[in-house]
Amino acid sequence: MIYWYIFLAFFIPGILGYGGGPSSIPLVEKEVVDHYDWLTVNEFSEVLALANALPGPIATKMAGYIGYQQAGILGAFVALFATVAPSLILMITLLSILLKYKHSPQVKKMTQLVRPVIAVLLGVMTWDFFQHSLSIEGAGFLHTIIIGLLSLLLLVKWKVHPAYVIGGALLYGAFIL
């Protein structure tokens, strides 16, 4: 029964917490502290502080920790699944609707309009990263140009898979920088 309770404790905030992890934190607290009495308010605040200190989504880190604390590895898995399940269900539902109407002129037009917007957003993000890399101590212009040109050659000329290029850039940064 504990797995069902863990699932409910994180699935309900996932459905009702519109806006991502930070908006669902009070709902998780209500379930974990008030409803199931798994943690005290002080313990919950410590879990929240730990989740904020680590990289990644807050809600999933909290779910994994609390699920593990209550029921071990399987409890952590159930809590993590319950946290992402509402988004997963919604994405599958919307994708099935999109696939059903993929030959519709409106859907084709929508996808044609979305692609340039995504390209512009990625371009702006790349430009921001480039400008930021120029101002970093030790990295600077030379390393940015080296990584950029080498990546371009690997991707375009030698047709290396992007995952290997990203991995190589990470290794370059780890060892050279």
Image: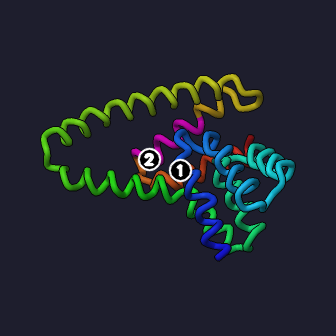
Magenta region? 146-156
Q: Residue visible at 70% across and 57% down? A: 35
Dominant secondary-structure state across the stretch colored magenta: helix
Q: From the viewer's side, name the closer residue of 84 and 124.
A: 84
Q: Residue at x 39, y 28 (%)?
A: 120
Dot 1: few (<14), some (14–19), or many (≥20) neighbours within 10 Å?
some
Q: Residue 166, position in %: x, y? A: 56, 49
Residue 148 inside the magenta-drawn segment: yes
- Whether the residues at callouts 1 and 2 have beta carbons within 8 Å, the answer is yes
Question: 140 or 4, which lies in front?
Answer: 4
Q: Quadrant of residue 63?
A: bottom right
Tell me the SS state at disc 1. helix
Residue 2 is left or right of residue 98, and the answer is right
Is residue 18 or residue 55 the one in the foreground? 18
Where, quadrant-wise, is the N terminus in this rendering? bottom right
The percent coordinates of residue 11 (x first, y second) are 56, 58
Mark 2 lies on residue: 155
Crowd around label 2: few <14 · some 14–19 · many ≥20 (10 Å): some
- In percent of width and height, residue 104 lies at 14, 45
Residue at 25 percent across and 50 percent down: it is 98
Give the number of the disc on residue 19: none
Looking at this view, name the residue that lies furthest to the front.
35
- Of the two numbered discs 1 and 2 on the same chain, state the one appearing first in sequence: 2
Helix, strand or loop under label 2:
helix
Amino acid tagged 2: Leu
Corner quadrant of residue 132: top right
Q: Is residue 152 left or right of residue 21?
A: left
On the image, numbered disc 1 is attached to which residue?
Answer: 165
User: Does the magenta segment cover residue 150?
Assistant: yes
- Whether residue 127 is visible to the viewer of this picture, yes or no, is yes
| Residue lying farthest to the right in this orientation | 42
The quadrant in which residue 176 appears is top right
